[in-house]
Amino acid sequence: MAVPPISDSNRNLFKSLIDHHVRFTLAKRRQQLTGHDWYQATALVVRDMLVEKMLATRARFDRVNAKKLYYLSLEFLIGRSLENNLFNLGIIDECRDFLADAGVDLRVLFDEEPDAALGNGGLGRLAACFLDSLATMDMPGYAYGINYEFGLFRQEIREGYQIERPDSWQRERSPWLITRPEEACLVPVYGRIEHRIDRRGEYTPSWVDRRVLVGMPSDLPIAGFGGGTVNYVRLFAASASDEFDMQIFNAGDYLKAVEQKMVSETVSRVLYPSDAVAAGRELRLLQEYFFVACAVRDILRTYLRRGEEDFRELPSKVAIQLNDTHPSLAIAEMMRLLVDEYDLNWEVAWDVTRSTVAYTNHTLLPEALERWPISLLERVVPRHLQIIYEINRRFLGHFATLSTGDSELTRRVAIVEEGYEGHVRMANLAIVGSHSVNGVSELHSELLKTRLVPDFYKLWPERFSNKTNGVTQRRWLLMANPGLANLLDATVGTGWATDLQQLRELEPLADNPELQARLSAIKRMNKERLARIVNRISAVDIDPEAMFDVQAKRIHEYKRQLLMALGIIHQYLQIVEDGIEPANPRAYLMAGKAAPGYWAAKMIIKLICNMGDVINADTRTRGLIKVAFLPDYRVSLAEKIIPAADVSEQISTAGREASGTGNMKFAMNGALTIGTLDGANIEIRQAVGADNIFIFGLTAEQIEEYQKNRNYNPRQHYESDPRLKRVLDTLASDLFCPKEPGLFRWIRDLLLDRDDYFLMADFGAYADTQSEIARQYVQEQVWNRKVILNIARIGCFSSDRTVAEYARDIWGLTPA
Ligand code: 26Q
């Protein structure tokens, strides 16, 4: 990258700032510093710089009274910040230089930083990529979330089983968080509604016997590339209200007061470790409500502070984006504040709310849609439940005037689902309460309209749109793959960092031998680095000469890690039973966390680990195949894995993966995809060209056809494909579980008589496609041409493009 010359004054500034923090923040002398102290001191200096730019950015936006976006999300998977901030502020070389003078290796410092793992997977990482793009594009884009004390659990593997350990990323306070006690929010919760009529004869409900939570905000600065704009995410931690506790203290119940304090502090204690199935737990509801209540208060307060008086102008100054339904109570909370506290009439408040809020859906699995029991809502947020009933009543009234009195249809679109135990459907609330609903890939947006919520689409087609996901090339290429980044700089110039489409200029060089050779050398270096890491964390020796075939993502049946496992077993049996050796050695690398309560997912991890134990120890496959499960997959590990991959596995059952974003990161780093026609894979194929991606398997349409006709017969594939029969019978034998006989037998049973995810139907095509990949990998020029074309044509999967589309079509946001 173009880096400003290292000036003596910069270096001196660095030195004096570090010395200051060493002395007065860490209270140590230089000679006493550990590696971790050096990390802290460096981070504190960077934080100082961020704070200044953050204040200047805020002032700049205020000066032009810019419209602001607020991104509401229960998850932000930020990962590490030091290296990213040094990059974006453009001071990484000065910093490296200065530390080298002090005898400290900057790269070693990076590893001292714990990941901020405030998210599960794709949805959380997407939020983080969007923040990077918003700041880089000088947009007034802010965000709200929860300051979890414990992020996503740390994964350890013992005897092949996943063990969850707490992630105490805040054991020492994060240098990146700026606490703002003066901006704390009070949030009422629990209690009951007293129905009253005021003097004018109007119904004025009063929320009594409520408890009060305090939301303590900490701001996490987000620097855009170049450092011109620094935005922030405001994260709230929950605590008890002193004032409220005093009442109990004064009433003499000391222990009860202390107990309530503890319960309050539990609200922001831990991130729910599930990335799909909605666990209907009270604590989760409290989290969702607590944080949107803080956020909406903060948004309205900020609006009023700017001297605005008329809430009807709010939609011209504020856009709110809901990251899935998790923050959808924001709709009810906004109505409550506007109607109950600011005395707006319902129609105006509704108009303002709907014009401000937009909703992104991230899932097609109907079982993953959030539904909250009415009884629970009544206990936790009684006033909000009333408001939701009123929204529902008015919506159904409006609906009745349009529809033909089809009662089935009315039942389907209702926000409140009646029944033995009534529920509120959060997706319905989010759709009714938003002016915009979007999916995250073309296929997903289509299925959203035609399968998931067709009734709403017929009612309001103009609300629906597609915004295909993207990822930030600053973190996933520039920072994670410096070798490739330098080669790209030298070949097409440095502009791609903020305009990824510029990589198109590589296209004419796809067959250039020199470029190909350099690319291979860089991949080789990245593979050597990963091989060392795998050796350290998985105790498996992999040869950098091998093809690195990688599947890294949350473990889920629909993502079909099991299909890759079947493919590996097939390859293994070909070697040991058929005597067919692959032309090139292959290393199968898998990584990902399973939700702690998801038994099948945890058993898949166990299977992969056991396969590794058996296959890696078998002398017959030595030098040919290796299998490794890499524990504790997280952002910082992904940054090491992705640049080293040759093959990227994106093999979900068609119609199940909303988009996928790992698929984009791998392709950007020159891995070729083996994938199904699912999520964004379809658009990746369109972009890179069908010759440069390996697509196989049933289409979403074919799968839907099977499901509609109930005529899928998985057993038929077992009986007609001897390869598949052998693989399943091997799985059901005790070859991979000599110490625990029968451990994996259930897998064959499940696949033969249910196979909900169509592994049997896709196995043959998958195995054939893998053979084709093996054939092509050894033709280096053929392979490298495809690699270059992937990199050259992946430009539209930058989150800069995605954010620009949201800004234009939904937020009405412009750079300031
Ligand atoms: C909900 C209720 C209670 C507890 C947990 C949850 C919960 C938490 C996280 C439900 C879902 C998630 C995360 C979903 C997710 O990561 N979805 C992924 O989003 C990506 C970004 O759009 C897509 O690329 C992926 O396809 C999609 O699976």
Image (tube, helix red, strand yellow):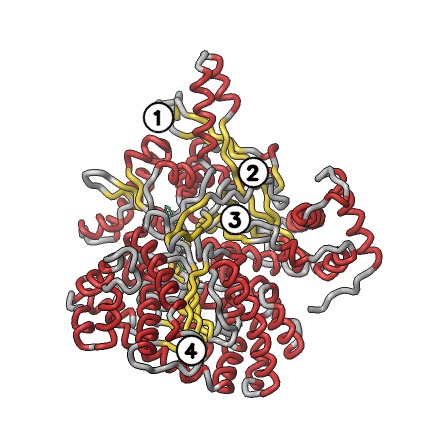
Which quadrant of the rendered structure holds the N terminus? Answer: bottom right
Q: Give me the disc on residue 217.
A: 2
> In x, y percent, where is residue 46?
69, 50
- What residue is rendered at 42% in x and 83% in y? 583
Distance from label 4 to label 3 (Cα)?
37 Å
Amino acid tagged 2: Pro
Tell me: residue 459, above or below residue 545.
Answer: above
Q: Give me the disc on residue 70.
A: 3
Distance from label 2 to label 3 (Cα)?
15 Å
First along the sequence among labels 4 and 1: 1
Which residue position is annotated with label 1? Answer: 192
Amino acid tagged 3: Tyr
Distance from label 3 to label 1 (Cα)?
31 Å
- What residue is rendered at 44% in x and 65% in y? 468
Q: Residues within 10 Å of mark 2 (few under 14, many from 20)?
A: many
Q: Secondary structure at mark 3?
A: strand
Tell me: residue 353, above or below residue 693.
Answer: above
Do the residues under discs 2 and 1 have CB atoms within 8 angstroms? no
Which residue position is annotated with label 4? Answer: 693
